[in-house]
Image (cartoon, helix red, strand yellow):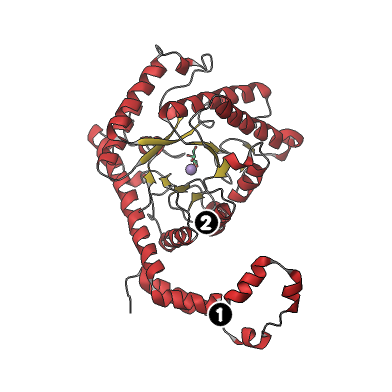
Amino acid sequence: MRVLSMPFWCVENPVGDPFGRSILDRLSPLEVCDLLCAAKREGLIELTASHDDNLVPWDPANPEDDQDPASQTSRTLQEIRLRLQAAGLRMAMITCDLHGNPVFRGGGLANPNPGIRLLAAQKVLRSIRIGHFFGAEYLTYWVARDGFETQFALPWENTYRYLLEGLNLARRYIRDNKLSIRKGSIESKPNEPRGEMLLPTTGHALALSDALEEPGFWGVNPEILQHEAMTNLSPFVALALAVARGKLNFVHLGNQKPGQFDNDNPTMIGMSGVKELVGVLWMLERMGWQGHFEFDNHVLRTDTAPGADNAREIRMDFIRLNVENFRLAEAKAAELSADRELAAMQKAIWGELPGLADLLARGDWRRILAERPDYGQLNAQAVRIARLDTRANRLLLGRRE
Ligand code: XUL
Ligand code: MN
């Protein structure tokens, strides 16, 4: 069974939208922490994650308040750490919120204004220290407000250099100070909150990661089914390429109607997504990827109601529903992996010519040129994909025969 993470921000979200205010009562960071600890005690999750701002407020005039043991920031962080430790819940990932504070409305690490880039850099370094305080392994950079609405607003000749400088700085700070974070993670998104974002897809994030000072430190955490599907891309290519490059850190998980705004529906809640998620789990298992899934979604706004009891119960229910849906998909993926009939159908399509596969893998062009494959026989076989998919559908819908 996969290890699962539920972040602070998903549970805290009181679910307002651009057309209406929040309905759920707000919870303090300590109250959110207590719900996450209860979820750990129930055996639902093993890990959590947070933005800096979900834990403690940021004061730009005092960017090192976390270093002062007497500060309110330090006291709150201490209390959260004590509660997490008592529940055995690990903070796996820290990410710097560069989207909420209005000063970052024109961008964070890639903001064209060096004064704002400096504020962003100081905030990222503080987030890294907070992550280290909790023993976090991952630092996520989500592209957030690094983007544009009009093409003439950005100094394009410098824009990606700014991003590289900001991320290289983060890596150097972690290395020089021997901090707990062992991987940087880049999360792409095509739009929202900006009209266009600088890293719209996982492919863009992977390409940028290779241009950083220490490419091996950096990987990605695609958000499926949301971020890629917002522009009708497939989660399979994003994840498979990231695994093939050895750069899939973890997966952000929710549900999405393809082509829409960032739905952030809970896992498998919505009109589609069941077959996709089962397929993703089947594929990642096949590829031997061992990492964890982190929910990144929120309560459906319809499913909220005001009041203190609702504020806790609805959020706990939200965690339980995410986990239940994930485990359903996971069990189904295992069933598909174990199905002999499906395996036989795949074999018929994928071919059984290990000698030739090895020959191609070795890449010796002389031997490759010397072969004479049987074109007639190869061309005479129908590629029976619809039949194979029907078998998968039977398994998905519970009709085994
Ligand atoms: C926004 C999103 C973020 C990141 C972390 O769409 O996915 O919550 O995952 O900042
Ligand atoms: Mn995300």
Residue ID for mark 1: 383
Which residue: 71% across, 40% down? 151
Location of residue 266 in the rendering, given as x and y in whole percent from the top left corner: 38, 49
Q: Can the viewer see residue 154? A: no
The residue positioned 69% from the left and 37% from the top of the image is: 160
Say which residue label 2 marks.
Answer: 235
Residue located farthest toward the top when viewing the structure as drawn: 70
Can you tell which mark lies on residue 351?
A: none
Marks 1/2: CA–CA distance: 23 Å
Q: State which quadrant residue 46 falls in.
A: top left
Considering only order in the chain, which callout, 2 or 1, is on the residue closer to the N terminus?
Answer: 2
Q: Is residue 162 above or below residue 349?
A: above
Quadrant of the image for the C terminus? bottom left
For image coordinates 49% across by 18% down, the residue present is 59
What amino acid is labelled 1 in the image? Val
Asked if residue 349 is positioned above or below residue 55 in the image, the reply reads below
Picture residue at 33% right of the left edge, 58% below the top: 328
The answer to which of 95 and 341 lies nearer the viewer is 341
**Location of residue 85 (image quadrant):** top left
Q: Is mark 1 within 8 Å of ligand 2?
A: no
Q: Is 285 on the left or on the right of 83, as rendered? A: right
Residue 364 in sight: yes
The answer to which of 399 and 21 lies nearer the viewer is 399
